[in-house]
Image: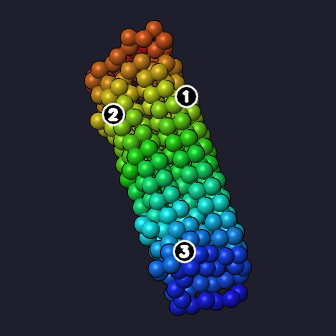
Amino acid sequence: MTTIENKTFDEERALYGSHDVLLKNSAFDGPADGESAFKESSDIQVDHVFCNLRYPFWHDHRLTIRNSEMTELCRAALWYSDQIEITDTKMHGIKALRECSNVTVKNCDIISPEFGWSVKHIRMENCTAQSEYFMMRSEDLSFSDVRFQGKYSFQYIENAVFENCSFDTKDAFWHAKNVTVKNSVVKGEYLAWYSDGLTLIDCKIIGTQPFCYCKNLKLVNCEMMDTDLCFEKSEVEAVVTTPVISIKNPTAGRIRVPSVGELILDDENAKAEILIQEQKKEDGREKMCACA
């Protein structure tokens, strides 16, 4: 492997077509403002590198990035690449990580609108992220200890598991398919509309009008805070451990909940069974009120 250290590159395609290269303590920066530094390269390791120019890692194979920084000017940093590992790195340019596969991201700080579109097989651990349309149309996601803030996250994703995460987001999980969320906080408006196969286990859900027009929705021992007009036209099996402000016209399934401030059933197709726990107990057993 060729090692390159303490260099600054600003020309167009500075290291185009490189193979078996370790780049250390270097920068892509300068007045020539060149693009596509490592385009069409393979077996590349980048360590303590400052990326301040556009499109540095396109069409790359077997790429490792450590202890580095991609600035706001580093647009679209990784596209059409595979077998990528990124650790302890700032990713602050718009549209990073698109059409990539087999990606691991650990201990990173992400500030990147339109991050992670159409990515396949991505694992993310112990990261913070700010974005809009985060991970849209991506598949096979495994996230743990990820803290996200933004809007329109995880739309159209398929086959994903999220554990010990915190998402402060609007319109999350729209049209998502086969997604499991465990031990996490999901805060935002209009969560998971049009999803199919979404399961939440031991989660806290916060915000107005969640889970409308869903299919195969499951909630297992979840808290719901400040949630109103829930489950409209959805197929749902839910065990909710906290009172809910209002439930509106769930289509099918069963919802078990301690109490509901308002139960709206003005649609003839609202056939779900709603089991409301009353405060009164009889014979040592909780008394339930079934509504349909």
Task: Tell me the distance, in whole angstroms, between the alpha carbons under discs 1 and 3.
Answer: 49 Å
Asked if marks 2 and 3 touch (Cβ < 8 Å), the reply is: no
From the image, which quarter does the C terminus lie in?
Answer: top left
Q: Earlier in the sequence, mark 1 or mark 2?
A: 2
Q: Position of residue 221 (x, y in %)?
A: 43, 38
**Would you place residue 11 above or below residue 230 in this image?**
below
- In this orientation, does residue 133 appear? yes
Residue lying farthest to the front in this orientation: 32
Residue marked by disc 3: 34
Q: Position of residue 227 (x, y in %)?
A: 33, 33
Does label 1 or label 3 sit earlier along the sequence? 3
Tell us which disc is closer to us: 2 or 3: 3
- Going by the numbered disc 1, the residue's amino acid type is Lys
Residue type, mark 3 in image: Gly
From the image, tell me which residue sits under label 2.
208
Camera sees residue 166: no
Reading the image, the residue beneath label 1 is: 215
